[in-house]
Amino acid sequence: METLIRLGWAVLPGLVVSVVMAVWNRRQRGRDAEADERDAKRVKGQAVQVSLLVAAAKLSYAVAMAMKRGAPNGEIEDGIEQYKEAMIAFKKFERELVAEKSADV
């Protein structure tokens, strides 16, 4: 009987540590998933920002070249197309953020 009690006391710390680690691992997986989701949103937001920046640069260049030549040469249409695509991507991203915020409430 005494041997069983000693065996129980010897095994108890390992069981307690195992339970604590299992709970901690479960919580850590949740935090990691949330961090991955935030990183994905940040990357998507950065991509939208770069797209808008490229559109602004193309339009600026097109206007500068049109002023230099005295007339537009087709570069403006390319800049406008890039701008439209960038705005579509931005509005889609913005709607996703708004929908996500309203779902969290």
Image: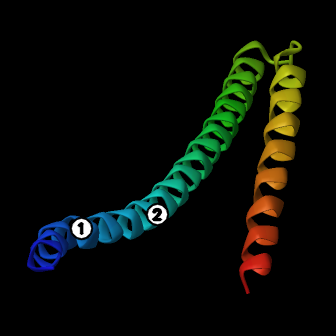
Could you tell me residue 85's position as x and y percent? 85, 35
User: From what the image shows, is residue 11 above or below residue 72?
Assistant: below
User: From what the image shows, is residue 89 above or below residue 14?
Assistant: above
Nearer-the-camera pick, 47 or 101:
101
Could you tell me residue 7's position as x and y percent? 15, 69
Could you tell me residue 13's position as x and y percent? 17, 71
Nearer-the-camera pick, 74 or 49:
49
- The Cα atoms of the two marked residues, 1 and 2, are separated by 14 Å
Q: Looking at the figure, which quarter contains the C terminus?
A: bottom right
The three-letter amino acid code for the residue at tag 1 is Val
Outermost residue, bottom side? 105
Callout 1 secondary element: helix
- The quadrant holding residue 62 is top right
User: From what the image shows, is residue 102 above or below residue 7?
Assistant: below
- The quadrant holding residue 96 is bottom right
- The quadrant holding residue 98 is bottom right
**Residue 17 marker:** 1
